[in-house]
Image (cartoon, rainbow, N blue to C red):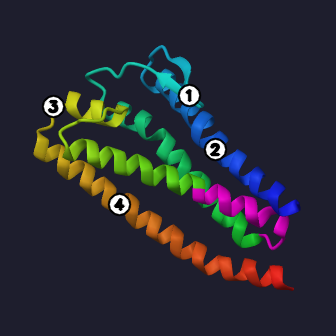
Amino acid sequence: MKKIINLLAGLFTGLLFVLVINQFLQGAAASVLLNQKVNYFFSGIKLVSSFQIPQDSFAGGLIVILIPIIVSFLLTEITMVILSKRNDDKTNIPLVIFILINTGYIILYIIITVISILFNNSLQNNFIILLTDSGFTYNQQLIFILAAAVLFFGYLNFVLKRMKRSLPAIIENKKK
């Protein structure tokens, strides 16, 4: 029963950050950095922050759009540090689930963005809208998004290798 509660705690916390808190932080950043009015609404179970990106603010818009990804990276790193320092079952299971949810969110975001660019903007998200409004040519958009995807997947590979090193210690601790 404790393992199920720990699993649900990690699942709830991870989903709360991915579905609600990341979007709230993105809206707050849009309000501060872009000086834009932000509207929040729920689309299904996900909080969505709606704001306009000014045409003359590519760098600010890029930072605001990448806030959920940056927050997921930071939370993954903080959680990895906590996971390496802790050796009790109560926190290890939720921490691993939390890391998996954050990395899964990053992977889905990147895949959707890459597919959207490759198929000529068939799927729309804020990142794609920013790229198309920036005046970049299609080839420049491809280079930009593929370079970003390579960097993101390189980082995720690094995180997964670190998780593989820490998971045996967690499993051995459970056998004792």
Judging by the rendered image, the residue that carries numbered circle 1 is 44
Q: Amino acid at mark 2?
A: Leu
User: Badge 3 is on which residue?
Assistant: 135
Q: Position of residue 108 (x, y in %)?
A: 43, 50
Q: Earlier in the sequence, mark 4 or mark 1?
A: 1
Three-letter amino acid code of the residue under disc 1: Gly
Q: Residues within 10 Å of mark 1 (few under 14, many from 20)?
A: few
Point out the stretch of residues depicted in magenta: 86-100
- Of badges 4 and 1, the one in the foreground is 1
- Position in image of residue 155 (x %, y %): 44, 64
In this picture, residue 170 sits left or right of residue 161: right
Q: Which residue is mark 2?
A: 15
Instruction: Identify the mark at residue 151; answer none if there is no mark.
Output: 4
Say which of 115 and 106 sits in front.
115
Disc 3 residue type (three-letter): Gly
The vertical placement of 66 against 172, above or below, is above
As measured in the structure, the alpha-carbon distance from the residue carrying label 3 to the one carrying label 1 is: 33 Å
User: Closer to the N terminus: mark 4 or mark 2?
Assistant: 2
Q: Nearer the viewer, residue 84 or 171?
A: 171
Name which quarter of the figure residue 62 lies in: top left
Q: Is residue 45 above or below residue 2?
A: above
Q: Quadrant for the N terminus, please.
A: bottom right
> Which callout, 1 or 2, points at the residue further toward the start of the chain?
2
Amino acid tagged 4: Leu
